[in-house]
Image (cartoon, helix red, strand yellow):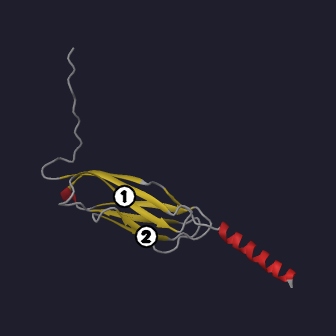
């Protein structure tokens, strides 16, 4: 009886160890995106973060939360199989609220080896009659 119990315990340990070795792992192509300079009247700005499951188990995004209400992430809800890709689309709309330079954070939580990843979007929203064209200031140097 002791031998049978010992064999069962060993088999359970082997299967538990094998399952523990299977884990999803998320790898983003980019974690920072610059939306550049744009005018408030140009509407909402969008960007897409792409990623791949480089682990050996299905990857599930549990949540993606933005640092403020002007930034809205939408993401792949289905499990992503090992070797497959997914995306997180981010929409920024600061119209009438946040002129100037900005940096927003999207916190992504998964079942992967790295449970939390932060994504960043930056940009410069101008208002009124400001130009979105980049201007260069050249200073004259006396001889």
Q: Nearer the viewer, residue 64 or 136?
A: 64
Locate the C terminus and report the quarter of the image it occupies.
Answer: top left
Marks 1/2: CA distance?
13 Å
Question: What residue sits right under mark 2 in the picture?
Answer: 63
Q: Position of residue 35 (x, y in %)?
A: 32, 53
Placement of 8 over or under 20, stated as above or below: below
Placement of 63 over or under 48, stated as above or below: below
Question: What residue sits right under mark 1 in the picture?
Answer: 105
Which residue is pictured at 48% across the width and 62% down the height?
116
Q: Position of residue 32 (x, y in %)?
A: 40, 52
Which residue is pictured at 74% across the width and 73% down the height?
13
Which residue is pictured at 17% across the width and 60% down the height?
96
Using residue 130 as the reference point, say whether residue 26 is left or right of it. Answer: right
Placement of 11 over or under 128, stated as above or below: below
**Residue farthest to the top, as pictured:** 143
Image-quadrant location for residue 41: bottom left
Q: Position of residue 123 (x, y in %)?
A: 29, 51
At numbered mark 2, what does the secondary structure look like: helix, strand or loop? Answer: strand
Do the numbered discs 1 and 2 sit on residues whose CB atoms are within 8 Å? no
Image-quadrant location for residue 21: bottom right
Q: Residues within 10 Å of mark 2 (few under 14, many from 20)?
A: some
Q: Nearer the viewer, residue 94 or 6?
A: 6
Image-quadrant location for residue 59: bottom right
Locate the N terminus and report the quarter of the image it occupies.
Answer: bottom right
Which residue is pictured at 43% across the width and 58% down the height?
118
Query: Which disc is residue 20 wearing?
Result: none
At numbered mark 1, what does the secondary structure look like: helix, strand or loop? Answer: strand
Answer with mark 1 or mark 2, whichever residue precedes in sequence. 2
């Amino acid at each position: 009886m002791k031998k049978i119990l010992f064999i069962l315990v060993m088999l359970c340990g082997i299967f538990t160890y094998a399952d523990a070795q299977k884990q999803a792992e998320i790898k983003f192509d980019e974690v920072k995106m610059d939306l550049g300079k744009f005018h408030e009247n140009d509407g909402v700005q969008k960007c897409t973060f792409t990623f791949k499951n480089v682990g050996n188990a299905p990857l599930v995004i549990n949540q993606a939360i933005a640092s403020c209400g002007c930034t809205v992430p939408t993401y792949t809800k289905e499990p992503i199989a090992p070797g497959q890709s997914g995306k997180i689309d981010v929409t920024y709309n600061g119209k009438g609220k946040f002129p100037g330079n900005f940096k927003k954070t999207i916190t992504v939580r998964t079942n992967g080896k790295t449970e939390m990843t932060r994504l960043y979007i930056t940009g410069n929203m101008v208002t009124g009659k400001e130009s979105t064209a980049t201007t260069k200031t050249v200073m004259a140097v006396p001889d």
